Amino acid sequence: MNKSINILDEEYLQWVEDLSVRYRQSQIKAAVRVNREMLKYYWELGRDIEEMHVEDRWGEGVIKNLSIDLQHRNPNSTGLSVRNIYYCKKFYLLYRQYFAIVPQAVAQLEDRKMPQAVAQLEEMLFSIPWGHHRYLMDRCSKEPAEALFYVKKTMEEGWSRDVLLNFMDTGLYEREGKALTNFTRTLPNETSELAQELTKDPYNFAFTGITKPYNERILKDALLGNISQFLLELGTGFAYVGKEFRLQIGQKEKFIDLLFYNLKLSCYVVIEVKIGEFDFQDLGQLSGYVVACNHILKKERRDNPTIGLLICRQKDSLLAQYALEGSNLPLGISEYDLSKLYPEKVEGTMPTIEEIEMKLGNVKQ
């Protein structure tokens, strides 16, 4: 009789739980390995088609014949259709230049570093699902740099296919890291580049669904009413702290529009949203909030200096640049856009409660 024995011993139950977790982890690892080996096979198939000049040698119909012959010899196989074999060729053609560049780029380094550089590129390229690659080949067939950008983002942030399509639709490649900032002057070298990469210009707020006249309160309420999409647009690592966050400064009460904590940078991020055109006084207000956060919220040996980001409806780039040059605080200025549409459902990667608590040490503000 196939029946589970009812054992209530805590050590036994914990052992069963540990075994279950390990089993699920092994399944995930196995799936990752299978995906990587399959992508390597597709890469090599595309390489053979191109480098052997098979279509020149045996005619344009050779791919159809190849598909039939491969499936005949491998009756339980998948991914050997005519269409998928053509994708294999496109896969190789899209990225092959990077495998040619890598050895040249490291030729002046020690020989032992060359395999490492190639391995890192292969790891990135062969780590994301084939379905993601097919979308990238369809959309970025003439732009290998853009395709590789989305490959890297997908690998680093664990994007689903829907999230990948979402960011491609909103032109993340053109927007990421484009905010006007003074980070290179006000942040250490090791963090200024990462901080810049976490910015966008413009930010896409179309998920708010705002189509009628609005004020700043309506916009901020709409952003927080769609907090998952808002955090996704800000980027991985942003944790929401509060809206109209109250600071007691001497005898005055001040309220920050939106306060976040970034786990990658280990710092608070003050965000001020303005529905009008940027002017000097806007950055002055933001600077005051950044200084106040450093004095009141920032913890020694835990937090890096606070960063301020002003997101406005419109800015004059020269005026914004002059304003940034006048500050020694790490500040950035971006625009926002309400015009582009997002999918109704967007799932992405955001910091978990455990990650936030671990980083902040369960300190309540």
Image (tube, helix red, strand yellow):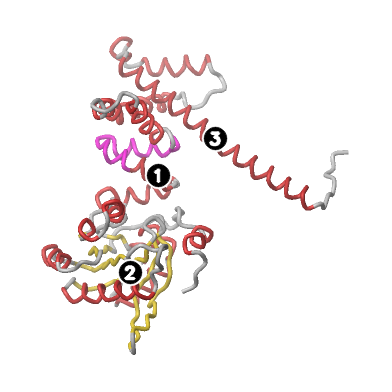
Looking at marks 1 and 3 on the same chain, the residue that comes earlier in the sequence is marked by 3
Q: Is residue 30 left or right of residue 239?
A: right
Provide the secondary structure element on which disc 2 rests: strand
Name the residue located 70 percent from the left edge and 48 percent from the top edge. 17
Task: Give the numbered dot on residue 174.
Answer: none
Task: Give the numbered dot on residue 270.
Answer: 2
Q: Position of residue 208 (x, y in %)?
A: 37, 66
Q: 275 or 246: which is nearer to us?
A: 246
From the image, tell me which residue sits under label 3.
31
Label 2: few (<14), some (14–19) or many (≥20) C-alpha neighbours in 10 Å: many
Q: Is residue 180 left or right of residue 4?
A: left
User: As shown in the figure, which amino acid type bears the numbered disc 2?
Assistant: Val
Q: Nearer the viewer, mark 1 or mark 2?
A: 2
User: As shown in the figure, which amino acid type bears the numbered disc 1?
Assistant: Thr
Q: Is residue 98 left or right of residue 180?
A: right
Q: Position of residue 258 (x, y in %)?
A: 36, 71
Q: Nearer the viewer, mark 3 or mark 2?
A: 2
- Vertical position of residue 132 compared to residue 268: above or below: above
Mark 3 and mark 2: span between their CA atoms? 40 Å
Name the residue located 81 percent from the left edge and 51 percent from the top edge. 9
Q: Position of residue 364 (x, y in %)?
A: 49, 72
Residue segment shown in magenta: 128-149
Label 3: few (<14), some (14–19) or many (≥20) C-alpha neighbours in 10 Å: few
